[in-house]
Structures are given as C-alpha cells and as structure tokens.
Amino acid sequence: MVREAIVQGDSLPEDESQRDAALRPRKLKEVIGQKAVVRRLTIALNASRKLKEPLSHILFDGPPGLGKTTFATVLPQELGTTLQMTSGPALSKPADLLPFLTNAAEGSILFIDEIHRLPRVVEEFIYPAMEDFRVDIVLGEGINARTISMPLKRFTLIGATTRSGMLSSPMRDRFKMQEHLDFYTTEELSQIVTINAKKLNTPLAAEAAREIAARSRGTPRIANSRLWWARNFAYSEANGDITLEVARAALLMAEVDEQGLDKQDRRYLSTLIQVFDGGPTGVEALAATMNLPTDTLSDEIEPYLLREQFIIRSPRGRVATPKAYGLLGVARIKDPAKQGSLFEE
Ligand SMILES: Nc1ncnc2c1ncn2[C@@H]1O[C@H](COP(=O)(O)OP(=O)(O)O)[C@@H](O)[C@H]1O
Ligand SMILES: [Mg+2]
C-alpha cells in the first residue's frame, strides 16, 4: 500500500509524520550513517536471535529528526516481531500503560517516545515490568487495599528522548543499551536525499543532492523536507528535475541560507545579539522574547547552533560567538555600560 503510494508519487501525503513514515528505512542495512550505533545493534540482534532471548531495553536520545523512531521501527522488523507505539505524554496513569504491557508478546517491542515526559507514577509502575517482567497492581483502597503481582511476557522496551538529561537516573539505568544519535555528515545526508528522491520518483542531480544535504542542519528529517520542497518547486517552476540551479532557487525561496539555517535560527541569533547584546542570557528570557516555548529553543533550535558554534552555553546562559555576529553581518560592539571594566582600566 505504502509502496504504491510512493511509486505514484503524486498521491504522497503532505503531512510530515506520514512523509516520515513513507521515507523511513525498513531494514537496518538501509539505515545510513550512525555506524557505531548500527554495529552495536547488529550485535544485540544477533545475540538475541542465537540466545532466543528478548533484546535488552534500549534508550535512544538525540535532537528531533535524527532517526530515533526509525531505529525503533527497524528493530522489530529485523526480529520479525510486533511493535506497539505510544508516548510519554499519552500515559498519564499506570492504567494507560497496563494494556500495552499485557498485550506485549514474548520478544515483542514496546516503543515509548518522549519517555522523559512520563509522569512519576507511571515511571515507577514500569520499573518492575522492565526488571522482572511483572506489574504490581493495587486493588481496593485504604485498609482493604492489596497488591497483586501479575507476570508479563518478556518484552523489550525502547525509549526515545530528545533530552536524556531530563530522564530520572533510575529510569535511565534500567536501559542496558543507551544510544546517542548525533548529527549527520553532508555525505550521509546526500545519500539519504538521493535514495529518497528515487522513492519519490524525482530526478535529482548529484550536485543538487549535495547542496540540499549541506543545507539541512545535519538532520535527515530536515533534508527530507528540503527535498520535498525542492521537488514541488521543480514541478511548479521547471520541468520537474531537481538540478543544482533549481535546488538553490528552491532553498532561497524557502529562506534557507547558505549555512542551512532557517528563519527561526536567524531570529534566535538576532534576538540574542540585538535584544540581549550577545548574552549571556538565560534560555527562558530568550524564549519569552521570541514568544516560543522554552523546549522548542533547547530541543530544536539550540543543539545545531551549539554544535556549529554559533552560540556557546556558559554557566550564566547563552552567548553568541563571533561566527553568529558574522552571519548576521552585525559588528560586535558591546554596550560600553556593560563592558565597564574595559573602560575603567
Ligand atoms: N539513519 C537514517 N537513514 C536514513 N534515513 C533516516 C535516518 N534517520 C532518519 N532518517 C529519515 O528521517 C526521518 C525522520 O527520522 P525519525 O526517525 O522520525 O527521527 P526522530 O524520531 O529522531 O525524530 C525518517 O522518516 C527517515 O526518512
Ligand atoms: Mg520520533
């Protein structure tokens, strides 16, 4: 079904989550990059098959769009087992989680996205399930309350989080494998974009693939959405082929700059530089000024800006680097009042 939609191309979903699902690798060997992670997972899979034991619980962490859900969906396919998916915010009480646990077949996988957002009570409920494959259910109330222990099938929990730092340490320690996903190289993104253009039946020149890859913030999901836009642009403004020229024009129109930064990234940097004089400033103040949730800044915008050293994180807050000033074409003259010591000496 999905395959057909891909081949037809035109009937592809506009919705980002459906697009992700359509372009997602199905097997571990289709996964590009993250070599060390893939190697460790391959070993875990082989061992699990040979020992006929479930895979150990795995935690994936890293910024959005780097492949956490991809790995979580590829693993059950490799094992030929079933996958149940839910997320931290959807589980407000133990009773919300219970059906997932009781439905879990031997060796199957339960994926909890945004696991750092699990409420405490649910987190505590999940510990015995992870450790001993049982749940403790309290029946009745007050002095009549009693706890019954219910055995579960041996399943594998896969957790994903954009912030492993926000996970409690008892929770984190129960994951025997912890895999951090890092940003991708231009070369890797170039491969991903090339493969996905084929899935979309869109001619994509090699230089255009590289251009899109280099301007995608090291992130496959962003590369996919830039590719998607370039494809629409090519059909509307040209003959449907994504040449280097078409790719550049499409990115220009999408307001993606040479470095791959988008409007939101530049707004972040100009707020930091123009409103807060380059910092240091707290992320909450920046978020309030930009009228965005703090999480959007720390989970989505900042990781790439930090990694590319447009900003640094100091104990007193975020600071813009000379590279950020250069990008915005702003001279780096600090407010003399704030640089008092320089002038007093
Ligand atoms: N290693 C990879 N190889 C190929 N494509 C990838 C890879 N990682 C991510 N992608 C692409 O990026 C999209 C978003 O990845 P996803 O797993 O949903 O990210 P996350 O769950 O970390 O936010 C996927 O649909 C897939 O097309
Ligand atoms: Mg995901």
Image: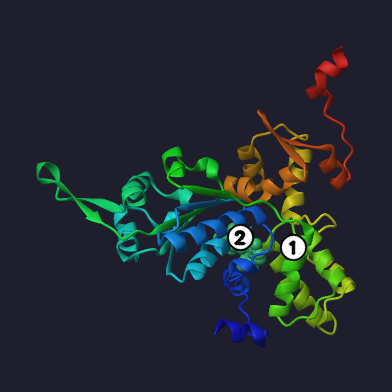
- Left or right: 274 in relation to 316: right
Amino acid type, residue under disc 2 in the picture: Gly
Which residue does the numbered mark 2 point to in the structure image? Answer: 67
Query: Which quadrant does the N terminus fall into?
Result: bottom right
Name the residue furthest front: 50
Instruction: Identify the element where label 1 is drawn.
Output: helix
**Residue positioned 78% across, 59% down in the render:** 186
Name the image quarter holding residue 326. Answer: top right
Name the image quarter holding residue 339. Answer: top right
Amino acid type, residue under disc 1 in the picture: Leu
Which numbered disc, 1 or 2, marks the residue that appears first in the sequence?
Answer: 2
Given contact means CB atoms under 8 Å apart, are the residues at marks 1 and 2 in contact? no
For disc 1, the neighbor class at 10 Å (few under 14, some 14 to 19, many from 20) is many
| CB of mark 2 near ligand 1 (< 8 Å) | yes
Whether residue 282 is situated above or below residue 214 in the rendered picture: above
Q: Position of residue 247 (x, y in %)?
A: 84, 70
**Residue positioned 78% across, 43% down in the render:** 310
For disc 2, the neighbor class at 10 Å (few under 14, some 14 to 19, many from 20) is many
Q: Position of residue 342 (x, y in %)?
A: 85, 18
Q: Position of residue 24 (x, y in %)?
A: 61, 70
**Residue positioned 57% across, 69% down in the render:** 17
Instruction: Identify the element where label 2 is drawn.
Output: loop
Residue 189, labelled with which disc? 1
| CB of mark 1 near ligand 1 (< 8 Å) | no
Disc 1 versus disc 2: distance between alpha carbons?
A: 12 Å
Q: Position of residue 176 (x, y in %)?
A: 47, 47
Q: Nearer the viewer, residue 13 or 133?
A: 133
**Residue positioned 61% across, 39% down in the render:** 284
